[in-house]
Image (cartoon, grey):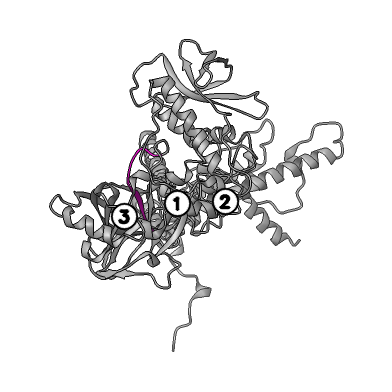
Amino acid sequence: MAPGEKIKAKIKKNLPVRGPQAPTIKELMRWYCLNTNTHGCRRIVVSRGRLRRLLWILFTLTAVALIFWQCALLVASFYTVSVSIKVHFQKLDFPAVTICNINPYKYSVVRDLLADLEQETRVALKTLYGFPENTSRKRREAESWSSAWEGTRPKFLRLVPLMVFSQDETSQARDFLTGRKRKFSGRIIHKASDAMHVHASKEVVGFQLCSNDTSHCTLYTFSSGVNAIQEWYKLHYMNIMAQVPLEKKINMSYSAEELLVTCLFDGVSCDARNFTLFHHPMYGNCYTFNNRENETILSTSMGGSEYGLQVILYINEEEYNPFLVSSTGAKVIVHRQDEYPFIEDVGTEIETAMATSIGMHLTESFKLSEPYSQCTEDGSDVPISNIYNAAYSLQICLHSCFQTKMVEKCGCAQYSQPLPPAANYCNYQQHPNWMYCYYELHQAFVREELGCQSVCREACSFKEWTLTTSLAQWPSVVSEKWLLPVLTWDQGQQIKKKLNKTDLAKLLIFYKDLNQRSIMESPANSIEMLLSNFGGQLGLWMSCSVVCVIEIIEVFFIDSLSIITRRQWQKAKEWWARRHAPPSPQGQDNPGLDIDNDLPTFTSALRLPPAPGTQVPGTPPPRYNTLRLERAFSDQLTDTQEPAES
């Protein structure tokens, strides 16, 4: 290297370095604070006095903390929705309407199948309450099923007896049928609401359910004998009817011609051909008006009861099962054409001798899916198979989950849930453990231990009809004198009896108005709005822009990391040089005598140590009079004068 280049390199090395190439982080931060556009950082460096500098440090850190807090709130609220409600006035499609008689099967037809069950029920009532065994009741005579039955006849198995349990003596329970006491060592579940006040009683009624090996038993007790007897009767009823083929159960229930006396829709007459059969195990034959199986979906262009569905239903109270149902009437549910009617969950009951008017308001909801909510579009991303031939809904998912769990653990499906005819319904002959298994699963489902509630999600789009119900006495006292004979004459071929007003119920379903309300969700934020809010927070608290953010990233991350890496590399090189350096000769080296090949500079000369025993004289003050021009030099020399012009 040439001597001139060495001098330049030496000077460059010894001059102080500022900016991104500063040797220490402290100098880098000082350079940044002096050159940045954020006002707070500059005031930290240029302020005089420790108190003022400390205050500016506090203000700057507070502003930075507020920026981070506000930006975190903006990010957290990014996936929020705004809800808009729109009201449309237009011609509306009429929903599907499913109607069921509360009594599933004609009692005169199924009484032979339930004779043993009813006999034990009456014995239990006599033992507990002293009821007389009076079974005389005028009913329609029907052909006995004993001669018409083909194959194995359904049997009533006394595997789940009714028992009286004393609260003072928890180890024994008395059997209703035999009167004997049984020892009990299993669990006791009292099926009464904790929120309701039940009168104190020393004896409660219940029944015992055990597993196959009878090693695990549970005693279910009830606060009322009515609830205990109805629940016990329902279990045996489901066990018996699960053994009956579907075709015979349809014949044992009500036909459309029997259930529907008159029908009128939008001012036009209709009949049983406008209804579709739907068989429900606990409600028998149900019929759906305006179902999806029809060619076209009916609609209405006017609001009011005159433009809806009007039907008169024949309830036939005499054919009611006295132990299965305790009320009289029908159940109706309004739903979409592709929706499964869970009439046992959300059905509306209709009273006899009454005109029930149901006014509807249609609300259509559209929700945003992930990441805004946990709803699902069609249920394809839910790990539960839809066992119902209907569109996805939260109810379908929950019911499908429970039935799937029951098939896995119990080996059969619950009879009270309508499944395809090929489903293997639970019964004692094939599944002796099904009642115990069903109750255990039901308790786990209520306690949310099956995981169905956490897996099933709400649908993103759905329709909901808000119902307003009103009642009026029907028929009136003055009109029943002519109305009932006319209806009896019209239904003479199907009913063959004189109608009573307690056997009839009138139903009116209509739109109160044609205002369709749509509730729609839309994203409340966007990327552009988020960046704009970020810029507003930076400008408000630090008078900063995006370029300042880039500078901060460069200085605090790139340059700082470069300085740290460079210092560590220098330390590593020095350590390596010391480790491999040759041993120094004996004696003491004088750093002032080191010979440098480079020419000396002013900075290097200042670093030389003074000679021992000598004093470095101070620099005398300058003599300013030396800068004056002396008079001796005012005259110009002769040899420098210009020759005169001649």
Circle 1 residue: 253
Circle 2 residue: 245
Q: Nearer the viewer, residue 84 or 614?
A: 84
Question: Label 1: few (<14), some or many (≥20) within 10 Å?
Answer: many
Q: Does residue 327 belong to the magenta stretch?
A: yes
Disc 2 secondary structure class: loop
Rendered residue at 48%/17% (across/down): 165
Q: Residue 89 location, x and y as percent?
A: 25, 68
Furthest residue in direction top, as rendered: 168
From mark 1 to mark 2, how far is it between C-alphas? 13 Å
Residue range corresponding to the magenta coloring: 325-335
Residue 6 relative to residue 165: left or right: right
**Is the C-beta separation of discs 2 and 3 under 8 Å?**
no
Disc number for residue 264: none
Q: In which quadrant is the C terminus drawn?
A: bottom left
From mark 1 to mark 3, how far is it between C-alphas? 15 Å
Q: Earlier in the sequence, mark 1 or mark 2?
A: 2
Q: Earlier in the sequence, mark 2 or mark 3?
A: 2
Q: Residue 414 location, x and y as percent?
A: 55, 43
From mark 2 to mark 3, how far is it between C-alphas? 27 Å
Mark 2 residue type: Pro
Q: Quadrant of residue 260?
A: bottom left
Circle 3 residue: 313
